[in-house]
Amino acid sequence: MAGLNTFSFRPGHSSLHRLDARVKLLGLMLISILTLRAGSVSLAFLTILLIVLAADCALSLPRLAGELKYFFLLLLLVFVARALSTPGDAVLQLKGVSVTSQGLLAGGLVCWRLLIIITGSLLLVISTRTARITGAVQWYFKPVPFLDETRIALMMGLVVRFIPGLLLRAAETADAQRARCVENRKNPVYRVRVLVIPFLRNIFLEADELVQAMEARGYTGRRTAPEFLMRKTDWLALVFIGIISFLLIVY
């Protein structure tokens, strides 16, 4: 159940909890986009900022690291791929494969950026109720013509609600495989197959059950949107986000 507690809304009184959902969503979108081209100085500043915000939300960093262990595996694969595919000065050569210093630097920056984005997204999820997030998405897309903002908000809400379930299901599947001593099999393809297939099957079954439940209740997505009210702290947060965005562009 750790995944459900970490990757879902947690009531609190932190600065992020008190901010308007639209402000937090806008800040996450801007920082995520600008982070993709940010340098090391900007990334270091964002890292410190996220650590401060996580501490303010009473989020345990060791526990967060434990919950993100599968994401760290993905980052490792990205790092290795960049280190091996980026041309430059070789620092290690083995059987025709070379690791370059430029590849190590590029891989480290990419992983750093992705980690900042996923951490920022996590802070948004744990500090904002799902209904407020979907309401903010609907508010942003409402003026856009030819788009059904309620459908987009519904999909966003389902994604946010499914993340804890996906992590919990993955942990349960892995525990079931360990109980059957699958980890003792030397064939890595077999181990991946017996883990992924049951996991995907359970996810598709849960998605089908959710669709049936929504249809049985006559769900249409046409609900009263939550009311938003900008306060002084929200406007100050917008100014702060603008300053951060400017610094990310400059540095």
Image: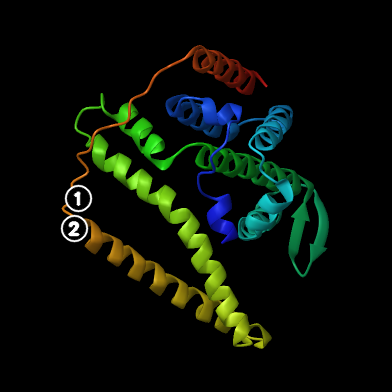
Q: Position of residue 53 (x, y in %)?
A: 65, 32
Q: With respect to residue 95, does 25 lie above or below?
A: above
Is residue 157 left or right of 66 when viewed as pictured?
left
> Which quarter of the figure has residue 217?
bottom left
**Quadrant that contains the C terminus:** top right
Quadrant location, the N terminus? bottom right
Q: Residue at horizontal 58%, vertical 74%? A: 174
What SS does tag 1 mark? loop
In three-dimensional space, the C-alpha distance between marks 1 and 2, rounded to whole angstroms, equals 6 Å
Q: Is residue 83 above or below residue 138?
A: below
Q: Quadrant of residue 72?
A: bottom right
Asked if 245 appears above or below 67 in the picture, the reply is: above
Where residue 119 is drawn, which disc sits there? none
Question: Looking at the image, which residue is at 40% across and 72% down?
Answer: 202
Amino acid bearing label 1: Tyr
Q: Residue at x 54, y 72 (%)?
A: 172
Horizontal placement of 242 versus 155: left or right? right
Which residue is drawn at the image coordinates 22% and 37% (left, top)? 148
Q: Is the residue marked by circle 2 packed among few (<14), some (14-19), or many (20+) residues within 10 Å? A: few
- CB-based contact (under 8 Å), mark 1 and mark 2: yes
* Horizontal arrangement in the rendering, residue 39 relative to residue 3 (left or right): right
Q: Which label was assigned to residue 219? A: 1
x then y, percent, for residue 204: 35, 68
Tell me the element at label 2: helix
Q: Which residue is mark 2?
A: 215
The spot of residue 203 in percent (x, y) is 40, 67
Q: Position of residue 235 (x, y in %)?
A: 50, 13
